[in-house]
Amino acid sequence: MVRSKEEWQRIQEEEDAEPYLPGFTRGEFDRLPESQQQRESQKFFQISASSLGYWKTCSLSPCRRAKACKGFLSEAQAKSGNYQPYFPPCIREGAYRQGHTLTEAERLFAGEDAEENG
C-alpha cells in the first residue's frame, strides 16, 4: 500500500501529538539520534530502578551514595552485549529485572495517563 504525501503528513502530526517519554512526543523521540534515544530511555527507567531499590546492589558508587539510580551505560558496556541499551546499567540483560522495571514504570506513571485522559 503506497501512502500519499498527505497521509504521511497526517501520521507525522499524530506522532508529534502523542506523548511518549517525559518531555518528548513520540515523533520528537523518533527523530532523535539512536544514542540520544538510549540516554533518554535510561533517564526514564532510572526512576523505576530507584523505586525498586536497585541502587543498593549497583556497582556504581554515585548511585549508592545518592540512594537512587544515576548511572548510564558507558560505550564499552553498550557494545559488550551484556546490557540492554535502553535501560541503566543496574538492570543488565536479565529479563527478571527488565520485566520488573517495566511493571514498576507502568505502576508509577499509570496515574499520569488517567489524569491526562480524565
Image: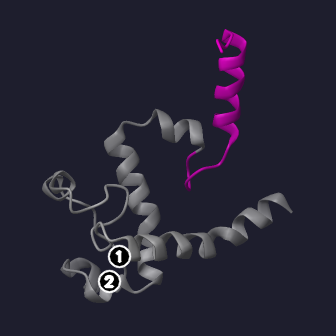
In the rendered view, would you say 36 is above or below 94? Answer: above
Instruction: Tell me which amino acid carries mark 1.
Output: Cys
Answer with left or right where residue 10 lies relative to residue 64: right
Read off the residue under disc 1: 69
At 40% from the left and 76% from the top, the residue drawn is 96
At 34% from the left and 86% from the top, the residue drawn is 67
Residue 86 lies, in percent from the top left, at 37, 56
At 55% from the left and 54% from the top, the residue drawn is 21
Answer with left or right where residue 36 lies relative to residue 44: left
Residue 105 belongs to magenta span: no
Residues marked 1 and 2 touching at CB (< 8 Å): yes
Residue 55 lies, in percent from the top left, at 32, 83
Residue 4 belongs to magenta span: yes
Structural distance between the alpha carbons of marks 1 and 2: 5 Å
Read off the residue under disc 2: 55
Q: Mark 1: which secondary structure?
A: loop
Stretch of the chain drawn in magenta: 1-24
At 65% from the left and 19% from the top, the residue drawn is 8
Residue 84 lies, in percent from the top left, at 31, 59
Pointer 2: residues within 10 angstroms few (<14), some, or many (20+)? many
Pointer 1: residues within 10 angstroms few (<14), some, or many (20+)? many
Instruction: Tell me which amino acid carries mark 2.
Output: Trp
Q: Mark 2: which secondary structure?
A: helix
Badge number at residue 95:
none
Q: In which quarter of the view is residue 13 placed?
A: top right
Residue 66 lies, in percent from the top left, at 32, 83
Answer with left or right where residue 55 lies relative to residue 48: left
Colouring method of the image: one colour
